[in-house]
Amino acid sequence: MVAYDGFARILHRQLLLPDGRRAVWDIHDTPATVSVLALTDDDRVVLVRQFRPGPDRVVTSLPGGLVDEGEEPVAAGVRELREETGFTVESAELVASIDPPSHTRPRHVVLARGARHVGDQALDELEDIDVVLIDVDELRRRLRGGGLGTSEQTYLALDHAGLL
């Protein structure tokens, strides 16, 4: 049953728990998302700073967004990177697909290499994004301090790249 259908969609889902009890749970029914750890040839990471409504403040995070229906996660990541930052990449690969505990669809993580700036951003109407380039050491420092909005995805991508 749909409990709310706006920017986010929330379902009331009846569940049968492993011990046999029944429960009703609120589940986020939103499209799959993708986050991209994009590395430049000089080992800097492309990040975005933007207002996020959940924490009600400007947050630095990996670029990313929604995966369109029928779109492959890597293609969505490369598209989102280009739209949000004006960067394109030489190569990109899927690192992981995470199943959040209260969501119906996954969060994908993409590692991209050879990032280079090729043009202007192509932002959505409500997006106001500043592009930030930092080196990997600074990214790791920010992660340890809890200063990123996509910590889980960033750790997975850095580990996959051998940069932790």
Image (cartoon, helix red, strand yellow):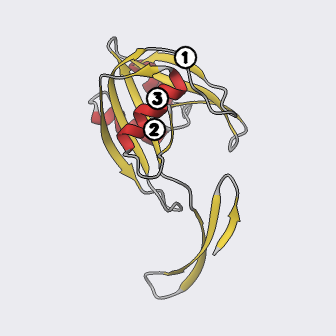
Q: Residues within 10 Å of mark 3 (few under 14, many from 20)?
A: many
Residue type pointed to by label 2 = Ser
Residue 86 placement, left or right of 71: right
Q: Quadrant of the C terminus?
A: top left
Residue identifier under label 2: 35
**Between 162 and 66, the one nearer to me in the picture:** 66
Is tag 3's residue or tag 2's residue first in the polypeptide sequence? 2
Q: Secondary structure at mark 2?
A: strand
Q: Nearer the viewer, mark 2 or mark 1?
A: 1
Q: Secondary structure at mark 1?
A: loop
Q: Find the distance from the CA under tag 3 to the CA under tag 2.
A: 9 Å
Q: Find the distance from the CA under tag 2 to the CA under tag 1.
A: 20 Å
Q: Residue at x 52, y 28 (%)?
A: 83
Residue that protrudes farthest toward the front in the picture: 70
Q: Residue at x 52, y 60 (%)?
A: 103
Residue identifier under label 3: 81
Is tag 2's residue or tag 1's residue first in the polypeptide sequence? 2
Q: Position of residue 8 (x, y in %)?
A: 65, 55
Residue 98 placement, left or right of 142: left
Mark identifier at residue 120: 1
Residue type pointed to by label 3 = Leu
Q: Nearer the viewer, mark 3 or mark 1?
A: 1
Mark identifier at residue 48: none
Q: Position of residue 24 (x, y in %)?
A: 61, 78
The reply to whether discs 2 and 1 touch (Cβ–Cβ < 8 Å) is: no
Q: Is residue 52 above or below residue 115?
A: below
Quadrant hosting residue 42: top left
Q: Position of residue 115 (x, y in %)?
A: 37, 19
Is tag 3's residue or tag 1's residue first in the polypeptide sequence? 3
